[in-house]
Image: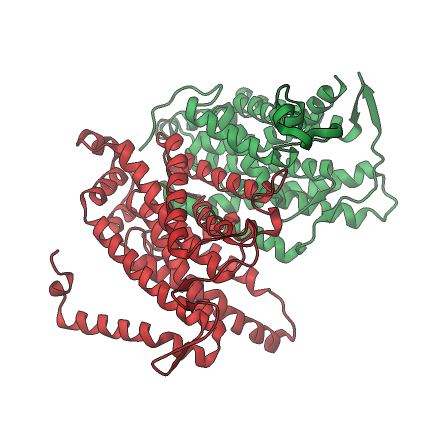
Amino acid sequence: MMNPLKTLSRREKLGLLLIAGTLLVLPFMLATVGTAWVRITNFAVLFVLLSLGLNIVVGFAGLLDLGYIAFFAVGAYVYGLLASPHFGIHLPFWVILPIGAAVAGLAGAILGAPTLRLRGDYLAIVTLGFGEIVRIFMNNLSNPINLTNGPKGINRIDHFQIGNVNFAGTDTFFGLNFSGPIKYYYFLLVVLMAVIIINRRLKHSRIGRAWVAIREDEVAAKAAGINTRNIKLLAFSMGATFGGVAGGMFAAIQGFVSPESFILNESIMVLAMVVLGGMGNIWGVIAGAVLLSFMPEVLRYTVEPVQHALFGKMLIDPEVLRMLIFGFALVLTMRFRPAGLWPEALHRREMTENRT
Amino acid sequence: MDILLQQIINGLTTGSVYAVVALGYTMVYGVIQLINFAHGEVVMIGAMVAFTIITALAGTAMPPTFIVLAGVLAAIPVCMGIGYSLERIAYRPLRHAPRLAPLITAIGMSIILQHIALLIWGRNPLAFPQIIDNPSFNIGGAAISGVQIAIIMLSLLMMGGLSWFVYRTRFGIAIRATAENVHVAGLMGINADRVIAATFVIGAGLGAVAGVMFGTYYGIAHYTMGFTLGLKAFSAAVLGGIGNLPGAMVGGILLGLVEALGSGYIGDLTNLCHWPGATSWMGERCANGADFVVFGSNYQDVFAFLMLILVLVFRPSGLLGERVSERA
């Protein structure tokens, strides 16, 4: 893998160029429809980052984590506490994001350590409990010392600032108006590229192969000389680190954080993105995350008018409909395409063959 | 003294509900080694159905006991039907799939059930209508209400009934044989599909009653109640040793007690102003009998999860479970 571009055919290169071009001009096209869509896209990219992080744990290492949103929460709260009037601390983002990533990574290791011996559904339930514990603490750590400001959350979080460019307002470069969300979009895009490259390198590295070996057969992996304990901890920690980075950016983009953003449903949503897209396959996971983050927005704009036209009133709230579709999507995917819409070649075999 | 006794009574009440719900998890797990993730939602729907019936009948002249009974009797078949469909839709087609697959379908079913409940009953909690007067009795300085007595008695009755069914009847033998080894049980002429479906249906029926009891005890039913209740009951099942019926009962009651005593005492225990020696460096924050409570009773829900994690770390097979070799 000296130069990954060299291995691509001409058609693939052309496709890649097309995607890159679209991604570059996308925010300006969306901004003509409404800045809201740029924001929606930003949140979609955040969810792509989260799914890629969870994909390391679930897809590569095969450890089902139902409390993944806790790491997102940790990253978001670290950012919120270190860049808001809550404590009066205002550190620049390039200091906080690594701190958030490190704290989240540590939280991942803390979760991983006691659960090393667990597998499958036991692990799922414990991680779920862990996610809930983190949320309960965030909800209640406002007394007697106000750490997290409880259910009200932390407000007025600082925007990113690079030199003189603040991500809150609009700036003009090269004759183009860059609004706040557009600047965040490009920042997110850069982070996303970095994360995708890291993920690809990880996957084909010694560590990545060790993860797959553990997923396929832990006993055999151990017998083959893999230090399963460390490698599993590494998977938890790495996944958590990505979650922490995404959380920090989420806090800055949204401007406030509260425990409500980190409920179990969010963990399940991220898991749905990974599973639906195709566990283990980076492109599948990205597709799943993009699909599921845009779906509710598209539904919001279509379900209401359609229902009004058909029945004259709203019968099903789009939010409820979205969750119902999620539920059915999970059930139907597992029944008919158990390896996801765009599965990894190896995973496809594993998920479709019978268990003996 | 009276606080201790009071918390024990409260703990026994919630604990016996946990135990009944835990039986649903443990029976299914015992037979197919899978967590019925949607069991909590079945319990929730039981409570919602019963509350709807009870509210509808509350205005009539019927005796209150009859109204509550009608609610429970309506909830049981509904939940049994859901339990059966769960098995058919989410578990049977995936019985030979990798074990991640049925877990994910179960999560999907749980989301679907929860949001169907949201569509039917809305976002606001249903309140238990004031139709029964709830007498309070005094035992040794603590109060026990009629509802609490009824919940504890009914739970014991159901646990006893289930034990009799599983250990003393022909079908119970079939269930235990299937749990032991599906293939060999099949060779002995046991229809494994029927046994597995039956465990789902029985568990759902018990869950329906548990849901009504839980809702009656707290006075409300809400479409999200199944999640925490289910998680706690599952913790109880794991605590006692999953797959083990007496284990689920012991685990449920123990979890209820730990939770009640924990939330009753954690405030006092973590009140730094009550710590000898702490008052000096706490300074004026403790002046005039002020309190400095680090963790209050609002951390109640943490106990179940902490206990679950501790059990799984130190004794993964639970209190009464036998050590089984882990399946890959």
Give the colour of chain A: red
In the image, what residue occupies the spot 44% across and 69% down? Answer: A181
In this picture, is B34 found above or below B324? below
In the image, what residue occupies the spot 18% across and 69% down? Answer: A12
Give the percent coordinates (x, y) of residue A21: 28, 75
From the image, which quarter does the N terminus of chain A lie in? Answer: bottom left
In this picture, is B223 found above or below A26? above
**Residue sitting at the far bottom:** A175
Give the percent coordinates (x, y) of residue A115: 39, 32
From the image, which quarter does the C terminus of chain A lie in? Answer: top left
Looking at the image, residue B307 sits to the left or right of residue A210; the answer is right
Give the percent coordinates (x, y) of residue A112: 37, 35
Q: Is residue A230 visible?
A: yes
The residue closer to the viewer here, B72 or A213, is A213
Q: Quadrant of residue B34?
A: top left
Give the colour of chain B: green
The residue closer to the viewer here, B85 or B102, is B102
In the image, what residue occupies the spot 41% across and 56% down? Answer: A93
Q: Is residue B80 visible?
A: no
